[in-house]
Image (cartoon, grey):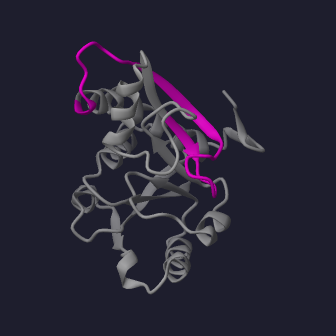
Amino acid sequence: MKNIVVLVSGGGTNLQALLDAQNRGELAGGKITCVISSNPNAYALERAKKHNVETAVIRRKDYDSLEAYDEALTALLTQKGADVIVLAGFMTILGKKVIGAFRNKIINIHPALIPSFCGEGYYGLRVHEEALKKGVKVTGATAHFVNEVCDGGPIILQKAVEVQNGDTPEVLQKRVMEQAEWKILPKAVALFCQDKIIVNGNTTEIIE
């Protein structure tokens, strides 16, 4: 049974999708054992407590440098026995040490079809604003491993979502969450926990 540690900063809707999937028995091979927040007031911590999941808080501003924070986060994740780490709206940049220590074990969800609308500065509503500005007819979400390049790690799963006439960034964001993010993030985590993801360089092969 793999230990799933979820990193959060805010409301925790993607964490809730993972907890719901676990309750439905869809995270076979893994269990959410700890939720770590960069924000002591994150509602995601309340979601974790309601499901009797251990929580911890580690704030960037409590450390003098990114290097010191990176060291502390790596130590905390190691102490918690993390087999896989899930970024569920974690708003603090990960340093090289934690990425290196957990190579191809950190999964992120991005609200677009990478390589579109991704990279530095593309998070939250901005992703959907840019998609609407570009006039794309299809957007979606991507579950991928994290490496040193922002949104540049091996892609695990993607799911397309149609853009509809009259969409606002907020409406599109909600549809992408409901139809894509909350579906493929738990699935990607389950695939990892069942050893069904083979990483070849910057691509993956899924064993069905």
Residue 160 in the image, given as x and y percentages of width and height: 46, 21
* Left or right of residue 146, residue 112 in this image: left
* Residue that appears at 33% across and 33% down: 129
Q: Say if 88 sits above or below 79 in the image.
A: above
* Left or right of residue 62, residue 27 in this image: right
Quarter of the image where one finds residue 201: top right
Is residue 138 within the magenta segment?
no
Q: In this figure, what is the number of numbered marks?
A: 0
Q: Which residues are magenta?
A: 142-170
* Left or right of residue 153, residue 69 in this image: left
Is residue 143 within the magenta segment?
yes
Outermost residue, right side: 200
* Residue that appears at 30% across and 14% down: 164
* Residue that appears at 33% across and 61% down: 53
Residue 26 in the image, given as x and y percentages of width and height: 45, 37
* Residue that appears at 40% across and 46% down: 123
Outermost residue, top side: 165
Looking at this view, is 199 or 136 the one in front?
136
Looking at this view, is 194 or 172 the one in front?
172
Residue 60 in the image, given as x and y percentages of width and height: 40, 76
Residue 150 in the image, given as x and y percentages of width and height: 56, 52
* Residue 126 visible from this viewpoint: yes
